[in-house]
Amino acid sequence: MKHVLLVCGLFLGLSISAQNTIKPIEVEVYGKGDPVLLIPGFTVPGSGWNEVIAYLEPHFECHVVTLAGFGGVPALEFPWLPKVNEALQEYIQINNLNNLSLIGHSLGGTLALDLAARMPDLISQLIIVDALPATGALYFPNFDPDALGYDSPYNNQQLALNATAFEAMAAQMAQGMSLKPEAQQRIKNWIVEADRKTYVYGYTDYLKFDVRESLKTIRTPVTILAADKPYGEAGVRQTYTTQYANLADYELVIATDAAHFVMYDQPEWFKIQLQRLLDF
């Protein structure tokens, strides 16, 4: 049962009690016990974790994040991602979330890595779900974050798409993110329902976000739960070995017959991993 709704918005020096302030994150809290913070991927609302919440709620206090611009949470001014990142750190500090386990999917996993580097004394472990420390480096040879800007032909084209064309694009993208048609429909809907500017410019923020150097400072236990589709286990291992080269120690566990949304494609496998890692 959800027992409290918390909203975090101390950013740019504004008071958390300020009226009419758009918050970078919205957090809903379920259950009681040791805290677990669940950070979703790009465009995904906190409700994307519902099946996981139902599994964890009897044992843990689940803090479930929705990022601004997604899931009906109002959009922010840009740059978007630095404000989200700062708000997550403030939320953990303000709510005294000691012995905290972080579970992050996709962008949420990258954010979790950065939080662990900056808050080593509060975070007890990281469970990273199909996420990389530098997604942009996967797509761009000789990756230079400073070369990516909001004003680009691709971004302008994305902003100009009409609703029908945008939905068709979202449906095509969703097909590669899960092997299950019902999950693909959910994923497509989240993309379509997202604030369009946050979807376009926020993804630029995401591609610019590179925490590979920060990995050198992480001493928190890290487990990566990765999908084998579409690249196959050998390709996945190569990518993760390269991207996580600066992380001293981690466990990589690869789900078979799973795409990006591992928790949807292999839910029982995912539960077994959570039970093992969270020890309940």
Image (cartoon, grey):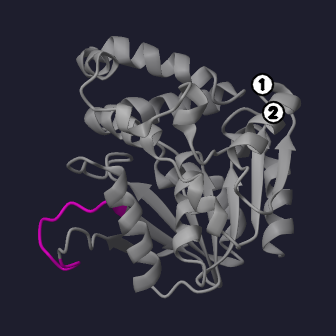
The amino acid sitting under disc 2 is Asp
**Residue 17 falls within the magenta-colored stretch:** yes
Identify whether 248 is placed above or below 219.
above
Q: What residue sits right under mark 2 in the picture?
A: 228
Magenta: main secondary structure: loop
In the image, 49 versus 125, the foreground residue is 125
Identify whether 42 is placed above or below 258.
below
Identified at 78% across, 43% down, the residue is 241
Identified at 26% across, 34% down, the residue is 197
| Callout 2 secondary element | loop
Identify whether 103 is placed above or below 159.
below
Magenta-drawn segment? 15-25
* Separation of residues labelled 2 and 1 (CA atoms): 6 Å
Residue 194 in sight from this viewpoint? no
Q: Position of residue 160 (x, y in %)?
A: 23, 16
**Residue 42 falls within the magenta-colored stretch:** no
Q: What residue sits right under mark 1 in the picture?
A: 231
Q: Are marks 2 and 1 in contact (CB under 8 Å)?
A: yes
